[in-house]
Each structure stands twice: as C-alpha cells, then as structure tokens.
Image (cartoon, rainbow, N blue to C red):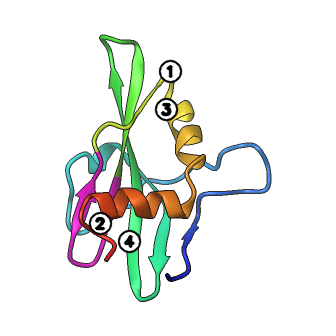
C-alpha cells in the first residue's frame, strides 16, 4: 500500500483558505463553479481535486461534489454534500482525509 497525501487543503488556523478557481485547458462539467482543493498523490499517480458547489434554490442550501482530474481521466462523485452555505460545504470537504478521498476515487474506477 502506497503513501497518501493531499496538498493544499489545510492551514494552521481555523479560517478556511480562499481557494482560487484554477483554469484548465480541458473543461469538465461544473468547472465554472469548482475550486481547486489540492492534489492527491500515491506513488506516480496524481489527481487534481476540485470541489464544485451549486446553490439549490428550492431547498435554500448548497450542494457539493468532488471532481478528480488526472492526466488521462476525469471522474466525479454525485452530490455528496448538502449544507447551508458554500463555506459549510468546504468545511465538510476538509473533514475528509486523503485516504477517504482515495476511497471515493477508487469507487469511481480511478486511483489504480
């Protein structure tokens, strides 16, 4: 079993960093609402991790899903977050460890 890491998601303070939206040459669905949350690595495998948020006016809440963008593959979860605000979605995302993110990725058919 390889080492796991995700960079770019944690700071020493309790304030969440304001992650910029990263522009990529190849678009993926929801990219305009996604923020780059870091990079997931295991051995020579590397995935950029994005968190997409979308307001749900009917519920007065914000949905979120995770995109994994690799050199040859783009995968995404379903809407796994439903919170009151975008900040709440980012906080919930921050509760996931790199190992848990790899489980999501493997469940989607990636990460091997």
- Is disc 2 placed on a helix, strand or loop? loop
Residue 23 shows in the view:
no
Q: Residue at x 30, y 48 (%)?
A: 77
Q: Is residue 73 magenta?
A: yes
For residue 98, what is the image quadrant?
bottom right
Task: Classify residue 45 as left or right of residue 109.
Answer: right
Q: Is residue 26 visible?
A: yes
Judging by the rendered image, the residue that carries numbered circle 2 is 24
- How many numbered discs sit on the rendered protein? 4
Q: CA distance from mark 2 to mark 3?
A: 22 Å
Residue with the mark numbered 4:
47
Q: CA distance from mark 2 to mark 4?
A: 13 Å
- Between the residue at mark 1 and the residue at mark 4, the CA separation in whole angstroms equals 28 Å
Mark 1 vs mark 4: which is more N-terminal?
4
Numbered range of the magenta stretch: 67-77
Q: Give 64 or 17, whichever is nearer the viewer.
A: 64
- Given residues 14 and 93, the one toward you in this image is 93
In the rendered image, residue 47, in percent from the top left (x then y), is placed at: 38, 71
| Magenta highlight on residue 22 | no
What residue is pinned by disc 1? 84
């Amino acid at each position: 079993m390889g080492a796991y890491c995700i960079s770019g998601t944690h700071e020493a303070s309790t304030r969440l960093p304001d992650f910029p939206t990263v522009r990529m040459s190849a678009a993926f669905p929801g990219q305009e609402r996604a923020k780059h949350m870091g990079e997931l690595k295991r051995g020579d495998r590397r995935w950029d991790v994005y968190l997409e948020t979308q307001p749900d006016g009917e519920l007065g809440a914000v949905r979120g899903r995770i995109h994994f963008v690799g050199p040859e593959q783009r995968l995404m979860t379903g809407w796994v977050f439903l919170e009151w605000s975008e900040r709440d979605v980012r906080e919930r995302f921050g509760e996931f460890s790199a190992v848990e993110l790899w489980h999501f990725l493997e469940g989607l058919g990636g990460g091997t």
